[in-house]
Image (spheres, helix red, strand yellow):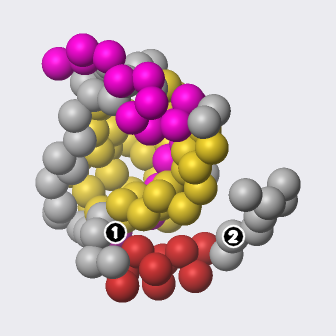
Amino acid sequence: MPAHQAFQLAELLARRAAANSSYLEFLRRDSLSVGLYVLAKGAIDPQKPHGEDEVYYVVSGRARFRAGAEDLAVSAGATLFVKAGLEHRFHAIEEDLTVLVFFAPAEGTAARDTV
């Protein structure tokens, strides 16, 4: 893998749409993986807790985000941290939601018994 890569949001959105999936992983290293997550207005977020820490950066859209007992409104520019194993999801999606997702270490590599 090259030491440097650049990604354009429009290209990532097109790749995700072509894959007909809500999530597109576009970078994977042992220590980190990064993906693009898109949920349409009114969609249900089917996430389960992950074995890795996560950071979400909301690129566009409006929704609510529940992590454990906390529930907050999120919109473009929001950055959210979720500790590995914590139940969390987006809900009450008012506008199509586009989110960058960062896992550390890479998603699936530190899987624990989280459920």
Splitting the image into 4 quarters, where does residue 104 fall? top right
Q: CA distance from mark 2 to mark 1?
A: 21 Å
98 to 73, vertically: above or below: below
Q: Is residue 34 above or below residue 112?
A: below
Dot 1: within a 10 Å radius of its alpha carbon, few (fewer than 14), some, or many (20 or more) residues?
Answer: some
Labels 2 and 1 touching (C-beta < 8 A): no
Amino acid carrying mark 1 in the image: Asp
In the displayed orientation, state which residue is furthest to the front. Answer: 1
In the picture, which quadrant includes the C terminus? top left
- In this rendering, the answer to whether 81 lies above or below 46 is above
Query: Which range is magenta?
Result: 96-115
Point 46% across, 80% down: residue: 15
**Residue 79: within the magenta?**
no
Q: Residue 26: x and y, percent?
A: 54, 62
Near mark 2 (Cα within 10 A), the count class, few <14, some 14-19 or many ≥20, is: few
Task: Give the residue at x 25% y 17%.
Answer: 114
Quarter of the view holding residue 85: top left
Q: Is residue 68 left or right of residue 35?
A: left
Q: Quadrant of residue 78?
A: top right
Q: Is residue 101 left or right of residue 114?
A: right
SS class of the residue under badge 2?
loop
Residue 95 in the image: x percent, y percent?
Answer: 33, 67
Can residue 87 be seen here? Answer: yes
Whole-percent x, y for residue 108 in the image: 39, 35
Select label 2 or label 1 by which is in front: 2
Tag of residue 7: 2
Which three-letter amino acid code belongs to the residue tagged 2?
Phe
Instruction: Determine which of the numbered discs, if any, sits on residue 52 in the image.
Output: none
Residue 96 marker: 1
Image quadrant occupied by the N terminus: bottom right
For the point 54% across and 74% down, which residue is it? Answer: 12
